[in-house]
Amino acid sequence: MSPLTTRLQLGASGSLIALILLCLVWEIWLAPLHQNGSLLFLKALPLLLPLFGILKGKRYTYQWASMLILLYFIEGVVRAWSDRGLAAQLAIVEIILSVIFFLCAIFYARHTRNLS
């Protein structure tokens, strides 16, 4: 693997894991939608589907996960616009992490196109 491929895989893996943790911490402890918590923390479950494929460097997983992550980008934009305080700040972090993952995933898939 080239150094660029390794960095893209590391960026995608790190941002995906950070996004999973953000979803859980955000909706359980930091700024849940309801006072007693909500089931919105379950939004982290779809992010677990591509996790092992991303960690193993499977090109197909990078391709379809780059489309999945757009849902989290959209949610982040909506909540950054509509929420206030800490929830809006966490939404901005969600936007940043989803953009990092998206860029790393599409460039990884493009860079490894001729390798598979």
Image (cartoon, grey):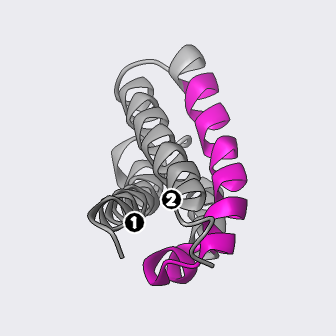
Q: Which residue is mark 2?
A: 108
Residue that label 1 marks: 9
Q: Which mark is residue 101?
A: none
Locate residue 56 relative to residue 53 in the image: left or right: left
Q: Is residue 73 above or below residue 8?
A: above
Q: Which residues are magenta?
A: 50-79
Q: Position of residue 51 (x, y in %)?
A: 52, 75
Query: Residue flagged by tag 1: what amino acid is it?
Result: Gln
Magenta-drawn stretch contains 59: yes
Q: Nearer the viewer, residue 80 or 106?
A: 106
Judge whether residue 38 can be spotted in this image.
no
Q: Residues within 10 Å of mark 1 (few under 14, many from 20)?
A: many
Closer to the chain start, of discs 2 and 1, is 1
Secondary structure beneath dot 1 equals: helix
- 84 relative to 39 in the view: left or right: left
Magenta: main secondary structure: helix
The residue that appears at 56% across and 80% down in the rendered structure is 53
CA–CA distance between discs 2 and 1?
7 Å
